[in-house]
Amino acid sequence: MKENLNTQMNDNKKIRLTKGDLISIWLRQNLFQGSWNYERMQALGFLYVINPAIKRLYPKGSKERQDALKRHLEFFNTHPYVANPIFGVTAAMEEQRANGQEIPDQTINSLKVGMMGPLAGVGDPIFWGTLRPVLAALGAGISIQSGSLMGPLIFFFSWNIIRLAFAWVCIKYGYERGVDLVSDMQGNLLNKLTTGASIVGLFIMGALIKNWTTINFVKVAYVIPKTAESAEKIVTYQNILDDLLPGIAALGLTFIVMKLLEKKVNVLTIIFGIFVIGIVLNALGILG
């Protein structure tokens, strides 16, 4: 009974991060890259984001707080949106250290460095390669079809709502899981996330190709003479392609561009090449 009472008293004496501290970290992560530099990349930004936890855990002016500030000035660089679980894990480790657990500086820094590489590899395909192009295509499609301002507004609000919600979930998850998050990363979780996001992005972008890419072959293939039952009908090569598969020309052009990108052809070269070919074929009366 006495041992249980002592344990409870020790637990009550422990310094705990509050939900307000986690919210402060969540708000500060919006300015994570505000002090990016070429020497230590995002180190200053990382310290700025995690500082509410340091202030809560270590007394003002103490050597412990000074040491905590110094150890988070080490080199750090990852995708800005997937740094959030690292913020959570770091806050959890700092909390454990402040409550007496022997966690060396090198352990905290090694964990940060070990996580930043794999997470960076996930952030680029999910956010830059899938989510942002899909939302931008959705907003642009609405604006093109209706001429409404709803397109850019939908892109702006949907992007930021998803970004902020993702940041909060990751910070909270990283804090609650603590160092156990490393075992999650060693599994197949990251590969599944990357693969799933890529598949969804390809499906959506594939569906948008037909609406975004317009190729019209106006050259006449043949003419169906006028009869007593029907008027004369002019059949273009575009009519033939549409009978085979609507949008097949746009799909073919997409595959050609993908192949050129695989062969490391410069993007500007591809864009200007498409311009030149389009102008020449239009002058020859093939495209319209």
Image (spheres, rainbow, N blue to C red):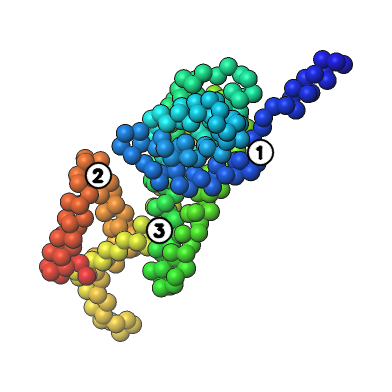
Q: Position of residue 197 (x, y in %)?
A: 46, 43
Q: Is residue 251 above or below residue 224?
A: above
Mark nearer the N terminus (3 vs 2): 3
Q: Find numbered disc 2 in the image and state the secondary structure of the residue it sits on.
A: helix
Marks 1/2: CA distance?
Answer: 49 Å
Left/right placement of residue 278 relative to residue 65 reads left
Left/right placement of residue 11 relative to residue 211 reads right
- Per the rendering, the mark at residue 137 is 3
Q: Quadrant of residue 232?
A: bottom left
Nearer to the camera, 52 or 280: 52
Q: Position of residue 156 (x, y in %)?
A: 46, 59
Mark 1 or 2, closer to the camera: 1
Mark nearer the N terminus (1 vs 2): 1
Nearer to the camera, 260 or 161: 161
Q: Quadrant of the N terminus?
A: top right
Nearer to the camera, 62 or 1: 62
Marks 1/3: CA distance?
Answer: 40 Å
Residue 203 in view = no
Q: Amino acid at mark 3?
A: Ala
Q: Amino acid at mark 2?
A: Leu
Marks 3/2: CA distance?
Answer: 20 Å
Q: Find numbered disc 1 in the image and state the secondary structure of the residue it sits on.
A: loop
Mark nearer the N terminus (1 vs 3): 1
Q: Amino acid at mark 1?
A: Thr
Q: Position of residue 266 (x, y in %)?
A: 20, 46
Question: Of all residues shown, which one is farthest toward the front?
Answer: 61
Q: Residue at x 38, y 30 (%)?
A: 75
- Per the rendering, the mark at residue 261 is 2
Q: Are marks 1 and 3 in contact (CB under 8 Å)?
A: no
Q: Position of residue 90 (x, y in %)?
A: 53, 30
Q: Quadrant of residue 264?
A: top left
Q: Which residue is mark 1?
A: 18
